[in-house]
Image (tube, rainbow, N blue to C red):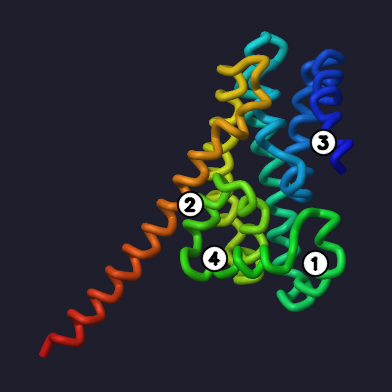
């Protein structure tokens, strides 16, 4: 897998040089794989697309569209897994084979706890957090979240993430590989904001319950 990841810039570059349409197709395909196999980093793929936009070899809108379609298809795959397979069977499978796709049972349990606490907000904001992006689709499927809201929230969060990565790659040019390091503080901030929002929401619910109990 690591060898494949190391060769991604070369593979995408060859596709772009052969034909821009093939380049868009390969970007979409790799983003699909990135959502199925988390070790493949979107922080490399979309900034590389932005670099080729800067070079004039690709156009911004088709790059964004290719990345978004690939992401939605990959997220839909894990959503379908969540709907079709119960959590116990999926955890058992991950305990035996999860290392090959970079996912462990603890990752699944953590994503489901997040979903139970925050629901649709996790589907949206989770798309902006590496390590959570892929697995957030599974609890949505397990909890039978309706497909249209799932796809809508996923598309919204994914578009923000893809746009940030692509524009960052376009701005950094040949330094596109540093985008992951550049975005690390931002993803950490999003995690902190989610925790603070959860605490505030819990406090608000508690205050309302106390207020209702005090009413005659």
Nearest to N terminus: mark 3 or mark 2: 3
Q: Residue at x 62, y 50 (%)?
A: 133
Label for residue 115?
A: 4
Residue bearing the label numbered 3: 5
Residue, disc 2: 191
Q: Is residue 165 above or below residue 153?
A: above
Q: Residues within 10 Å of mark 1 (few under 14, many from 20)?
A: many
* Residue in the foreground of this view, choosing between 155 and 104: 104
> Could you tell me residue 19's position as x and y percent?
83, 15
- Kindly check if marks 4 and 2 are in contact, taking CB atoms under 8 A apart as contact: no
Residue under the image location 73 percent in, 38 percent down: 31
Image quadrant where residue 161 sits: top right
The mark nearer the N terminus, 4 or 2, is 4
From where the camera sits, is residue 63 visible? no
Is residue 43 found left or right of 152 in the rendered image?
A: right
Give the residue displayed 65% in from the left and 22% down from the top. 176
Q: Are marks 2 and 1 in contact (CB under 8 Å)?
A: no
Comparing 73 with 165, the one in front is 165
Image position of 165 (left or right of 17): left
Q: Which residue is mark 1?
A: 94
Along the polypeptide, which appears first: circle 2 or circle 1?
1
Instruction: Choose mark 4 or mark 2, whichever is in front.
Output: 2
């Amino acid at each position: 897998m690591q060898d494949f990841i190391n060769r991604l810039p070369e593979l995408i570059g060859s596709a772009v040089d052969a034909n821009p349409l093939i380049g868009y197709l390969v970007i979409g395909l790799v983003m699909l794989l990135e959502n199925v196999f988390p070790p493949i980093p979107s922080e490399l793929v979309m900034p590389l697309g932005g670099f080729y936009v800067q070079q004039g070899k690709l156009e911004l809108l088709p790059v964004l569209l290719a990345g978004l379609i690939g992401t939605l298809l990959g997220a839909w795959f894990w959503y379908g897994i969540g709907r079709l397979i119960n959590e116990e069977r999926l955890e058992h499978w991950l305990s035996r084979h999860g290392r090959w796709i970079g996912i462990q049972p603890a990752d699944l349990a953590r994503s489901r706890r997040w979903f139970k606490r925050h629901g649709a907000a996790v589907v949206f904001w989770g798309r902006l957090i590496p390590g959570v992006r892929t697995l957030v689709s599974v609890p949505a499927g397990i909890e039978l979240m309706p497909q249209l809201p799932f796809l809508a929230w996923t598309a919204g969060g994914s578009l923000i993430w893809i746009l940030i990565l692509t524009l960052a790659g376009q701005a950094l040019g040949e330094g596109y590989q540093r985008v992951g390091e550049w975005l690390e503080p931002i993803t950490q901030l999003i995690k902190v904001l989610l925790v603070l929002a959860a605490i505030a929401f819990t406090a608000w619910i508690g205050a309302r319950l106390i207020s209702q109990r005090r009413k005659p």
